Amino acid sequence: MDDEDGREGYRVRQYEPGDRATVLSLYETVFDRTDPNWFDWRYVDNPYLDETPIAVAETADGELVGARPSVPIPLRAGDERVLAVVQVDPMVHPDHRRQGLFSKMVTHVYDHYASREPQVSIGFPNEAVLGALEKLGERLSLHRGVTREFPVYYRVQNPTALTSLGGDRTSKTLGKLATAATRGYLSLRTGTPDDADVSVRRERDVPAGELATLAASSPLPQAHADRDAEFYAWRYANPRFEYETLLAERGGSPVAAFVVGTQLGLDSTVVHVTDVAPLTGGEAWTDAVDALLARVVADNEDADLLSVFGEAIPDRLLRKYGFVANDEAPLSRVTSANYLVARPLTDETVEEWVVGGQRLSAGERWRFTFCEREIG
């Protein structure tokens, strides 16, 4: 499906294999970074769609000047699995901005998938992109979906590393943060696991089959990426991170696991608790997560920042190990809000958005970690 605008002379269409070099160049122009291996992992080698899900904008003479990529993932909600696309990295060449190309590409994606899979659109926009989407709210049926903030927790072990999160806003606040750290606000607590019978085993990779078995052991009704072995194998081949797995065991049997990712190419050492399997559980699971957090802190005492996204890990455990939410002062002064925008992709009338018996227009019906967020 093409989208024409005769007045401006721009056309929006689906990506073709011959566009690869130009889209990579556009990444370098807009984001000051290009990585062919990462591009192929994210879009070309993704196992969930036959096409490469990128909308591109070009001029009347065929010059490619914009792109709106999507990343397909399997989504599980209740007892149903559907295909979703995570909307990522909107790009318009500086010479062609303020021509409405962002809106045209967003609308194209919505129309392209309205009568085919995927069925769900997911995005993690910043405030500027969120504002642009809200202007298209009625056209994109945002009122049928959900817009909400997700918490991010930081264990700040080197306050100067926050410059990578807050940009110019950090300069006047870093001194206050450093002072606060000495007062214990951003204290380097190590904590002690409550259950001494839980041991932690490290794997230097991501054992897809073992994690898939753990993930399936405690089903979760909230919407989340469907973590089967195929998903784990693709997801943790991301070349921009180095991943390892920590498995908490009792009596030699795994109870819970963390995937821990270190982001490559940064001046600071930033470590994510990328994922937890399963995403929920009872008392034994909570004790295992307690032990896993203790191990993450002990193994990464030289890192600048440790970070957790979302609500899968209990808040009380995160605070026990010195993690602070980004919406609390002083972190709220130097970090940006993290938004989720999700909506149905369909050309049918949606009175109430329900998938697998879950009303996905309710913000609490979503359970994401960095597993989903790092994709976006």
Image: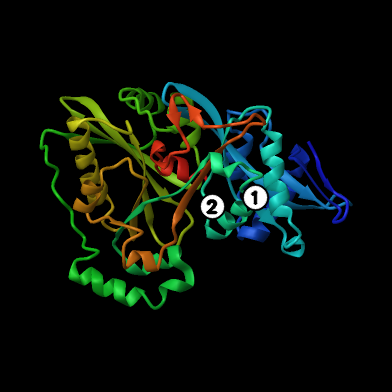
Is 258 above or below relative to 83?
below
Q: How many marks?
A: 2
Q: Which mark is residue 87?
A: none
Amino acid at dot 1: Leu
Is 162 above or below relative to 174?
above
Q: Which residue is mark 2?
A: 125
Where does the N terminus fall, quadrant-wise? top right
In x, y percent, where is residue 239?
A: 51, 44
In x, y percent, where is residue 173?
A: 36, 75
Closer to the camera in the image, 26 or 265: 26
Q: Give the residue at x 48% y 25%.
A: 230
**Residue 226 in sight from this viewpoint:** no
* Few, some or many residues within 10 Å of mark 1 (<14, 14–19, 20+): some
SS class, disc 2: loop
**Residue 55 in sight from this viewpoint:** yes
SS class, disc 1: loop
| 286 relative position to 331: left or right | left
Question: Between disc 1 and disc 2, whose residue precedes?
Answer: 2
| 186 relative position to 337: left or right | left
Q: Which mark is residue 136?
A: 1
Query: In which image quadrant can residue 227 be found?
Result: top left
Q: Give the residue at x 72% y 59%.
A: 93
* Alpha-carbon span between mark 1 and mark 2: 14 Å
Amino acid at dot 2: Pro
Closer to the camera in the image, 88 or 363: 363
